[in-house]
Amino acid sequence: MKPISGGADLHLHTTYSDGYCSPHELLERVAKIGLTAIAVTDHDEISAIPEATDLGRVKGIEVIPGVELSVNYQGQDTHLLAYCFDCENAEFLKHLSLFKNQRISRAKEIVDKLEMLGMPISFACVLKKAGEGTVGRPHIANVLLEDGFVYSFQEAFDKYLGNGKPAHVDKYKIDLTSAIKMVRAAGGVCVVAHPAIQLNHEELLQLIECGVDGIEVVHPRHTPEETECYKNLTRQHNLLATGGSDFHGIPRGGEVLGKFKVPYHVVEDIKARAGFWKTKTL
Ligand code: AMP
Ligand code: ZN
Ligand code: FE
Ligand code: FE
């Protein structure tokens, strides 16, 4: 029997996307806090999972497969969490590698735009910041900061990189229905990430219609009223009610770790739902 006291944080980032902690550092922190289970959910990237799983085994922390996919729903940039998929599924891996390459081309386009705006940062430095993982705007923001073009990480987004700003370039996104199909084919489940950040109520209902398996109910950017509303929706539609801290590391809201979690039974609910879909797709 699993202990139920620690709870689960099902939304965590590492250096394999735009987090500041390596899988090792993350597991150290999670062990100190005493969580029972976690999911590492890097943006469009699953390379941290084997390392995190092995470390978790040593420390007695269950690590379930996770990823935060960049999804397009009717032109809207939406984040979709996927859990408990087969990490070796060929189609899934093929798509993740497409994501990775498209992110590199997009980062180059952003760097070119910044140069035209009078901020010649090095593309090699941006890629170095991303390391082995997927490259994103936060890596570019940090290079802008280091090179003295902005006074803060946030200023880089507010002035140049944010949506609609002069150096913004859209990223490659997978269409919502294709994403759901791809995750199901890999035996996993799909959960709408932090709906309060990017969706109104009507849009969230439409995503439920499209067949997502759950809603991320617990998230630092949700008000108590929003959390309650999403919880009710999951009850009404028989959906998974997940949650997590969306921890990116100490420089970016490090205090959230351990404060945004769900009971361990949610992990069992996810596995049961993934198992149900597996019986349908076999
Ligand atoms: P990307 O996936 O490259 O588009 O980068 C997205 C990440 O950048 C998000 O997950 C946030 O961590 C960060 N981000 C996006 N928009 C902003 C913003 N306006 N201010 C600060 N950080 C942002
Ligand atoms: Zn992020
Ligand atoms: Fe997100
Ligand atoms: Fe996230």
Image (cartoon, grey):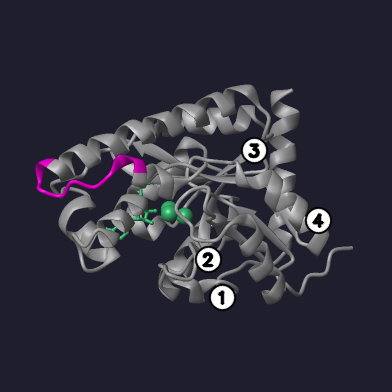
Give the spatial CA distance, label 1 vs label 4: 23 Å
Helix, strand or loop at label 3? It is loop
- Residue 125 visible? The answer is yes
- Which mark is nearer the camera, 1 or 4? 4
Tag 4 or tag 2, which sits nearer the N-term? Answer: 4
Q: Name the residue under label 1.
A: 259
Q: Which secondary structure class fits the magenta region best? A: loop
Measuring from the top left, give residue 99's x and y in whole percent.
Answer: 44, 32
Give the residue displayed 62% in from the left and 47% down from the top. 48
Is disc 4 placed on a helix, strand or loop?
Answer: helix
Q: Badge 2, how many Cα within 10 Å: few under 14, some, many 20+? A: many
Q: Residue 188, which numbered label?
A: 3
The percent coordinates of residue 63 (x first, y second) are 71, 53
Q: In this view, does 14 lie above or below 228?
A: above
Q: Where is residue 127 in the image (x, y as percent from the top left)?
A: 39, 42
* Residue at disc 1, CB closer than 8 Å to ligand 4: no
Q: Earlier in the sequence, mark 3 or mark 2?
A: 3
Q: Do the residues labelled 2 and 1 touch (CB within 8 Å)?
A: yes
* Contact (Cβ within 8 Å) of mark 3 with mark 2: no
- The Cα atoms of the two marked residues, 3 and 2, are separated by 21 Å
The residue that label 4 is drawn on is 57
Amino acid at the residue labelled 4? Arg
Q: Give the range drawn in magenta.
A: 116-124
Image mark for residue 245: 2
Disc 3 residue type?
A: Gly
Mark 1 residue type: Lys
For marks 2 and 1, the one nearer the N-term is: 2
Q: CA–CA distance between discs 4 and 3?
A: 21 Å
